[in-house]
Image: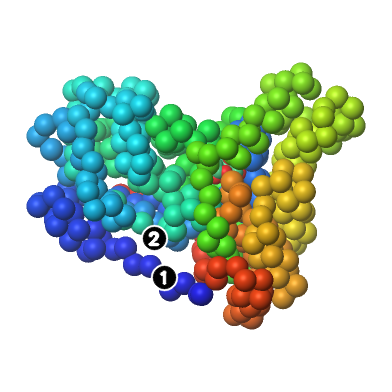
Amino acid sequence: MTASRPTVTAATIRAEFAARFGREPRGLWSAPGRVNLIGEHTDYNDGYVFPFAINRRTLIGLALRDDNVLRVASSHAAESVEISLDDLAPEKLADWSAYPLGVAWALGQFGARLGSLPGADIYIDSEVPIGAGLSSSAAIECAVAVALNDVWHLDLDRRTLAKVGQLAENRAVGAPTGIMDQSASLLGEADAGVFLDCRTLDADVIPLGFDAAGLELLIIDTRVSHSHATGGYAARRASCEAGAAAMGVPALRDLHDRDLAKAAELLDDETFRRVRHVVTENQRVLDTVRTLREHGPRAIGALLDASHVSMRDDFEISCAELDLAVETAKAAGAIGARMTGGGFGGAAIALVPHELVTPISAAVEQAFADAGYTAPTLFTVRAAAGATREL
Ligand code: GAF
């Protein structure tokens, strides 16, 4: 099933806002989902990532209120949820509204004096598929963060807003995720990737050059749904922290290839393989950025492939559908392919020559049908601008 482009527009947001709240929004903001080109499960290990913001966005309409009530509504929920700003606390938030309301709470943790600020009505709609590993959650968090930052005149910079989104996700949603997704959604630029050092938060925006090289980035959404608030993600994070502690370093970022022999002696086999994934993945991010700069995007395929193998065999976060997507895309001519995002489902990416998008998509669809899997959703994405005020 090849997806047609979803259309959430300023007009649809305005109309829905009016239908839900009986008045006009005061402004519209948007934030993109992201694809991670390479650097998986490295962010919370203080390592490197290289994601880009995509041309699928979450849009929100917002109007301030005269009282201190925050009321949120979404295209995905029939009922709106409301809470007084004075009452905001992670333990009072649940389900989808924990994302936008969690951001408001997190802004309070970064200096916003919630007790003295006006409430707001917020309507949310999104083109980012949920559960596909394209960061629909960060898109919501970042759209709400930039909007409240504007209307509350908080003047927080983008790196701080990324931390706000991460805190909302960690505490209000309960997913122990890193800083990558929010950074991509806030710092992304058209046709460029965000090379981020997750320890210093230094970011370099690097042209990807896919178009000029005749390449497209194909998303293969396996439709195997995943959640980072459940076991697997947290277990991987715990293994990494245990590995770093046993090796006597603050974070796995501080280990390199040369340390792996010692790690193999000290650690149990499973922890060692988790550590080896992170150490080699960090190096692959650095190699990808260098290769892209020196030789262009057609030269990065082998690094994408190696990243997938490492996630499949060492980090063990792939699944049969993701492996089939990657293998089939490669066999049909992709330059490189890997699962993207937190894993245990979600999407794979394939870097493919423009003229092979259709045959590769058909090959993947056929392979899924032959295996008896749910039909995947396939579409191409482009690197797009980060979160912004639209109107
Ligand atoms: C999810 C998390 F939200 C990110 O922080 C990152 O750890 C990613 O999984 C894996 O690279 O998207």
Q: Quadrant of the C terminus?
A: bottom left
- Residue 264 versus residue 159: which sits nearer the camera? 264
- At 28% from the left and 52% from the top, the residue drawn is 77
Left or right: 305 as drawn, with respect to 95: right
Confirm whether residue 203 shows in the render: no
Q: Label 1 CB, ligand 1: below 8 Å?
A: no
Secondary-structure class at tag 2: loop
**Height in image: 18 above or below 178?**
below
Residue designated by label 2: 127
Residue designated by label 1: 5
- List x then y, in percent, for residue 222: 57, 62
Q: Earlier in the sequence, mark 1 or mark 2?
A: 1
Q: Quadrant of residue 155?
A: top left
Q: CA distance from mark 1 to mark 2?
A: 8 Å
- List x then y, in percent, for residue 307: 73, 51
Q: Residues within 10 Å of mark 1 (few under 14, many from 20)?
A: few
Instruction: Kindly give the residue lying farthest to the front in the view shown.
Output: 372
